Image: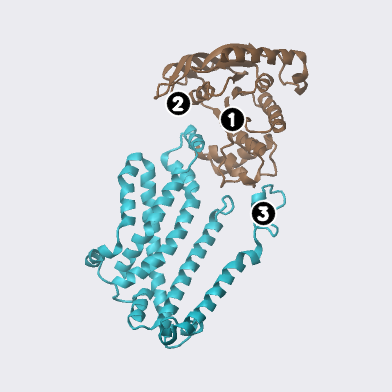
Chain colours: A brown, B cyan
């Protein structure tokens, strides 16, 4: 699947269909591209196949039909839960991926330190996950993926379980990381305002089978000013996306 | 973990203001013990001429310091402890390996699990002749009985632990192309440690039972406290009998507590090990 030529396109889905062994059609005729420098968000109702999209992109599942082209092997994957190993400290959790790639100890410790600094968890290296709040666990999870220096970041509703304040703060952190680290993102969520705030492009999906019903370019500048959320333009776009979502759902 | 930045209240659960406290914890069982002791004296008094069947507590305890009986009892206990420990070690190794094998593939589990259940259902009494033929009537046979009795909790607990791994955790490893061995050692076995220690604690108690049962059937060499119990019971030495039973059960309790402690030391930092 991965091609060797470096292009602007990192991820390209062409006419992707996913049928599960029990006959459920999770995705149908999905065309989608993620270019370098883009942050694409997919919104849709629960059970519309959004997560399946990510699982195919990451290689956890193989599409039953269509082609998926991936132009990088540096992929970060952020799960719905923080998926930290409870017996490992923050430091050891963040080091895990490098450890699985057999990176030497000193190198991965340094890498982890840097990532922990980036997500603002300095001082918590020795804490176990159970001593952290939900938001801090998610930061640890983000730091863990950052150690891979991903070119493409896949997010599977990472902030869905967090409270509103923590969620907004993490949205801002993510935007900062996006500006700083220059990765491309594919972000799944069911929050329309989160989608519009985070992304350069919003894709609206409908369920059963999951198809793309609409795409919106988000015109606001990056790095994004948090105040943009309170402008009429922002509200108008959120309204348009919400309408598309509702129409697609009916 | 005791630093003040640790936010989780669960870590402080054993603190002074939480839980039942020392009196609440030790009070009720101590009261029950006192009741049993008083009951024993009353029963002894009521039995009249047959009072020898139920000796009074101080007579029983006296046997544990009596130079005529105490050395016998404690030497036998030592022998029992050795059988139990060796048996437990073997049961742990076999049980963990067995469970790992079953966790690797569905078909292995389907093939092997019925035998784990069967092993647990076999009446030891019925197969003692078989064990005797194969392993003799000495130490090895006592260990075999002990292993058979202590094995099942190790198998079932380890398997449960290995299978309790989160799907997302497994995928996290798979996404990095981790090998089966890596997943086993860095994820599954780590995740299973609390269950393995819980199994060890149950099996430790059972291994003492197993060693004593083994003594009843295989009495050559240096048999343990089970053989002594059989002897005292045949001679109607009830005070000595009670003393031996008391020592044997206290030993079981101590082993249970020791393995509970080891378990808490091993995983208590990240898991509330009961």
Q: Residue B137 occupies which quadrant of the picture?
A: bottom left
Q: Is residue A40 above or below residue B214?
A: above
Residue at image point 43% right, 82% down: B239
x, y (%) of residue B175?
A: 49, 32
Q: Which mark is residue B12?
A: 3
| Circle 1: element type | loop
Q: Earlier in the sequence, mark 1 or mark 2?
A: 2
x, y (%) of residue A227?
A: 78, 21
> Is there any visible trace of residue B85 in the rendered image?
no
Which of the pair A113/B151 is nearer the observer? B151
x, y (%) of residue B264?
A: 55, 57
Q: Looking at the picture, do discs 1 and 2 lie on one chain?
A: yes
| Circle 2: element type | loop
Q: On what subunit does the disc labeled 1 rest?
A: A
Q: CA distance from mark 1 to mark 3?
A: 38 Å
Residue at image point 61% right, 64% down: B25
The single residue placed furthest to the left in the displayed view is B133
Say which quadrant the N terminus of chain A sits in: top left
Q: CA distance from mark 3 to mark 2?
A: 43 Å
Eye-nearest disc, 1 or 2:
2
Q: Which mark is residue A61?
A: 2
Horizontally, is B11 left or right of A205 in the view? Answer: right
Eye-nearest disc, 1 or 3:
3
Horizontally, is A72 left or right of B157 in the view? Answer: right
Q: Looking at the picture, do discs 1 and 3 lie on one chain?
A: no
| Circle 3: element type | helix
Q: On what subunit does the disc labeled 2 rest?
A: A
Horizontally, is A219 left or right of B89 in the view? Answer: right
């Amino acid at each position: 699947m991965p091609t060797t030529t470096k292009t602007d396109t990192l991820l390209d889905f062409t006419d992707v269909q996913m049928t599960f062994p029990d006959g459920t059609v999770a995705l149908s005729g999905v065309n989608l591209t993620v270019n370098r420098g883009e942050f694409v968000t997919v919104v849709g109702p629960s059970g519309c196949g959004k997560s399946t999209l990510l699982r195919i992109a990451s290689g956890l599942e193989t599409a039953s039909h269509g082609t998926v082209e991936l132009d990088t092997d540096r992929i970060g994957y952020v799960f719905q839960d923080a998926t930290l190993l409870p017996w490992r400290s923050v430091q050891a959790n963040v080091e895990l991926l490098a450890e699985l790639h057999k990176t030497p100890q000193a190198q991965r410790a340094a890498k982890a330190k840097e990532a922990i600094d980036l997500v603002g968890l300095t001082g918590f290296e020795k804490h176990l996950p159970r001593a952290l709040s939900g938001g801090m666990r998610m930061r640890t999870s983000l730091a863990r993926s950052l150690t891979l220096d991903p070119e493409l970041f896949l997010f599977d509703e990472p902030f869905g379980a967090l409270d509103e304040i923590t969620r907004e703060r993490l949205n801002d952190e993510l935007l900062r990381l996006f500006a700083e680290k220059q990765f491309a993102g594919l972000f799944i969520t069911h929050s329309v305002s989160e989608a519009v705030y985070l992304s350069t492009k919003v894709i609206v999906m409908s369920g059963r089978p999951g198809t793309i019903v609409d795409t919106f370019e988000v015109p606001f500048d990056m790095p994004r000013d948090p105040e943009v959320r309170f402008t009429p333009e922002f509200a108008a776009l959120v309204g348009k996306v919400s309408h598309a979502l509702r129409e697609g759902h009916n | 973990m005791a630093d003040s930045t640790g936010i989780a209240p669960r870590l402080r659960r054993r603190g002074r203001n939480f839980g039942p406290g020392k009196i609440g914890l030790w009070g009720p069982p101590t009261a029950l013990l006192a009741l049993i002791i008083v009951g024993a004296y009353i029963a002894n008094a009521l039995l009249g001429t047959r009072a020898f069947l139920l000796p009074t507590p101080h007579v029983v305890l006296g046997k544990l310091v009596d130079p005529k009986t105490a050395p016998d009892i404690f030497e036998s206990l030592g022998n029992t402890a050795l059988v139990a420990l060796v048996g437990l070690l073997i049961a742990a190794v076999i049980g963990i390996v067995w469970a790992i094998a079953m966790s690797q593939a569905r078909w292995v589990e389907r093939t092997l699990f019925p035998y784990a259940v069967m092993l647990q259902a076999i009446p030891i009494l019925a197969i003692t002749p078989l064990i005797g033929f194969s392993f003799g009537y000495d130490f090895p046979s006592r260990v075999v009985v002990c292993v058979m009795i202590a094995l099942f909790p190790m198998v079932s607990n380890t398997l449960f632990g290995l299978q309790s791994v989160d799907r997302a955790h497994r995928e996290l490893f798979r996404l990095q192309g981790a090998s089966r061995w890596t997943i086993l050692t860095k994820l599954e076995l780590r995740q299973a440690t609390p269950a393995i220690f819980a199994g060890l604690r149950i099996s430790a108690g059972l291994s003492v039972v197993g060693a004593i049962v083994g003594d009843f059937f295989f009495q050559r060499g240096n048999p343990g406290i089970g053989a002594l119990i059989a002897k005292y019971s045949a001679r109607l030495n009830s005070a000595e009998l009670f003393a031996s039973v008391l020592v044997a059960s206290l030993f079981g309790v101590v082993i249970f507590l020791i393995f509970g402690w080891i378990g808490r030391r091993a995983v208590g930092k990240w898991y509330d090990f009961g």
